[in-house]
Image: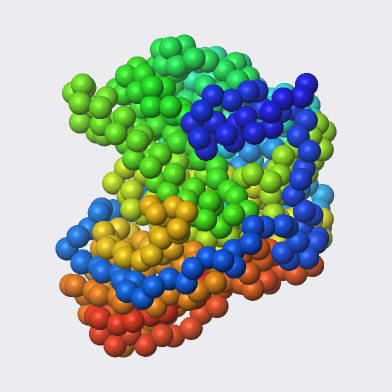
């Protein structure tokens, strides 16, 4: 079967109808063992230098709202080497006694992931969770129709929960609304959360887990609108069925939080919510971007921000016709750069995207967008965690941190819990007047004792000097600046050259609530100031 390989990504990025996702995609990304900057990119040397007058103004009275730490979530799917050979590698000398890669565990813990989504993704629409429990050697091997590979089922619900506990993350499970039934979904909730003397709760106890897992977050299907999905449905079919799934699941555990499946169009989202507004706590949003052209990739972040705004408007429209008091929120539970790497049947190395510095800046801008949308975006899960469009890549003997790892780690470590409404002035890309060279978020803590500025300079060649003005906060005389940068926008981290894009920390003079700071070309700078 040969079909348009851009179908799924095009649907998610552009919101337009597309053909069936391919079952036999060639991998077109360079191998990680290669040298940095091996990919061909568009010449950026003709970008004009920015004019003077760039400015960031922060008023501590202008707060957007609290930031939910779940925006720093992540996603693992049974796809390629994400699970097997990624986080889970039985028999490897690098793994612990439970089969989890210790080097990967250390790197994952550095990201401080609060929420981990599993098992899919497209995989879940053909997944029977009951295959993945009980003695591992007795679990059935299945053919995964989503990603055209064998599935051993040696990593299932119990192993997923165990991994979440090891990294300190809340589990987020998506149920099968493609080939699965509402009874399957309710049984899964019972297995995870019930304490009663009932079959699935007792089976969990028999399998060595007497205490309930208390899984709070549950997704009602994955991309069920797409023809690449097993059992895909129209919104007219999905909405009423998802309501029945929600009822069955909540009748087992009334405390769970449910994520409705958002779609690529406003019509889908509005109609889905009209059916689910009374039961859904969130509606999902998926976005994949990317380009070898710097201006286009930066502009794609502008598209993500607009996608959030349009979905939020659809929520407002539906909420206006209900008596429900709690607003439905947005779960951006798949987001990343994905445009180079694809897959083919029976190949373990699927979707192994090699990220460059340009992609790291895009990821940082996406996190800035989630900060600016803090009132409505309460969950965001980078897709995915290891090997598959991921910040961490492994081999049998080691691992490498890709460029996008660094902004994820810095934001989780240093950004505050309250988003501030920063005023930003800078020149824009000539091709895209609505996309500035500077992308900024500002955060503080609950006591207003720390200010963190995350500043992305997307200009390919020029440093930008910025006048920074702060009202309502008196910083100490120096601050800490963490800069993510490399020799060029095309720089990559590979096994051969793992340190091309790194984080460098330095102290910078501040000199009061009005000061000037230069931000290097093609860089992310996270500047932390203490009161």
Q: Position of residue 376 (x, y in %)?
A: 32, 42
Instruction: From this view, report whether residue 310 is shown above or below residue 352.
Output: above
From the top left corner, tell me how far across and down residue 184 is, in percent: 55, 18
* Residue appearing at x 49%, y 64% in the figure: 458
- In depth, the one of 297 and 392 nearer the eye is 297
Residue 250 placement, left or right of 336: left
Name the residue: 41% across, 85% down: 508
Q: Quadrant of the N terminus?
A: top right
Q: Is residue 224 above or below residue 70?
A: above
The image quadrant of residue 37 is bottom right
Q: Quadrant of residue 40?
A: bottom right
- Please state if 212 lies on the left or on the right of 353 as rendered: left
Residue 234 image point, x, y percent: 49, 14
How many numbered marks are there?
0
417 or 484: nearer the viewer = 484
The residue located at (36%, 76%) in the rendering is: 52
Q: Is residue 314 above or below residue 480?
A: above
Q: Position of residue 454 (x, y in %)?
A: 41, 66
> Is 272 placed left or right of 512 in the picture?
right
Residue depicted at x 82% and y 49%: 91
- Front one among 347 and 437: 437
Note whether residue 78 is visible: yes
The answer to whether residue 194 is seen in the rendering is: no
């Amino acid at each position: 079967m040969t079909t348009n390989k851009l179908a799924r990504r095009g649907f998610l990025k552009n919101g337009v109808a597309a053909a069936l996702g391919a079952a036999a995609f060639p991998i077109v990304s360079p191998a990680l063992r290669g040298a940095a900057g091996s990919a061909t990119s568009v010449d950026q040397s003709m970008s004009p230098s920015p004019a003077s007058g760039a400015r960031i103004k922060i008023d501590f009275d202008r707060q957007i709202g609290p930031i939910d730490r779940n925006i720093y979530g992540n996603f693992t799917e049974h796809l390629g080497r994400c699970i097997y050979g990624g986080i889970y590698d039985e028999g490897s000398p690098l793994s612990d006694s439970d089969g989890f890669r210790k080097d990967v565990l250390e790197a994952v813990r550095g990201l401080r992931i609060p929420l981990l989504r599993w098992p899919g993704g497209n995989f879940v629409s053909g997944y029977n969770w009951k295959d993945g429990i009980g003695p591992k050697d007795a679990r059935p091997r299945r053919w995964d129709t989503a990603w055209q590979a064998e599935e051993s089922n040696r990593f299932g619900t119990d192993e997923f929960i165990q991994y979440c506990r090891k990294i300190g993350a809340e589990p987020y499970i998506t149920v099968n609304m493609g080939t699965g039934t509402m009874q399957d979904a309710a049984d899964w909730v019972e297995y995870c959360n019930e304490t009663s003397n009932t079959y699935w709760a007792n089976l969990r106890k028999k399998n060595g887990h007497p205490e309930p897992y208390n899984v709070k977050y549950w997704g009602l299907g994955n991309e069920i609108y797409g023809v690449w999905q097993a059992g895909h449905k129209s919104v007219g079919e999905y909405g009423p069925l998802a309501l029945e799934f929600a009822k069955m699941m909540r009748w087992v555990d009334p405390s769970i939080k449910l994520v409705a499946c958002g779609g690529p169009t406003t019509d889908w989202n509005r109609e889905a919510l009209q059916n689910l507004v009374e039961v859904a706590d969130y509606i999902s949003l998926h976005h994949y971007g990317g380009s070898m052209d710097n201006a286009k990739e930066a502009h794609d972040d502008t598209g993500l921000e607009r996608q959030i705004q349009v979905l939020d408007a659809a929520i407002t429209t539906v909420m206006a016709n209900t008596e429900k008091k709690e607003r439905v929120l947005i779960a951006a539970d798949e987001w990343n750069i994905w445009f180079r790497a694809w897959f083919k049947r029976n190949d373990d190395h699927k979707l192994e995207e090699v990220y460059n510095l340009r992609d790291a800046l895009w990821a940082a801008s996406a996190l800035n967008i989630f900060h600016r949308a803090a009132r409505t975006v309460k969950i965001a899960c980078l897709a995915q965690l290891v090997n598959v469009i991921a910040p961490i890549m492994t081999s049998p003997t080691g691992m490498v941190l890709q460029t996008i790892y660094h902004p994820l780690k810095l934001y989780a470590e240093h950004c505050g819990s309250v988003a501030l409404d920063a005023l930003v002035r800078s020149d824009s890309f000539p091709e895209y007047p609505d996309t500035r060279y500077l992308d900024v978020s500002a955060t503080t803590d609950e006591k207003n004792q720390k200010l963190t500025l995350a500043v992305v300079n997307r200009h390919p060649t020029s440093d930008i000097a910025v006048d920074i003005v702060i009202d309502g906060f008196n910083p100490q005389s120096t601050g800490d600046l963490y800069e993510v940068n490399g020799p060029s926008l095309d720089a990559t981290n590979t096994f051969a050259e793992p340190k091309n894009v790194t984080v460098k920390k330095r102290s910078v003079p501040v000199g009061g609530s009005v000061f000037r700071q230069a931000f290097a070309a093609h860089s992310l700078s996270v500047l932390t100031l203490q009161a």
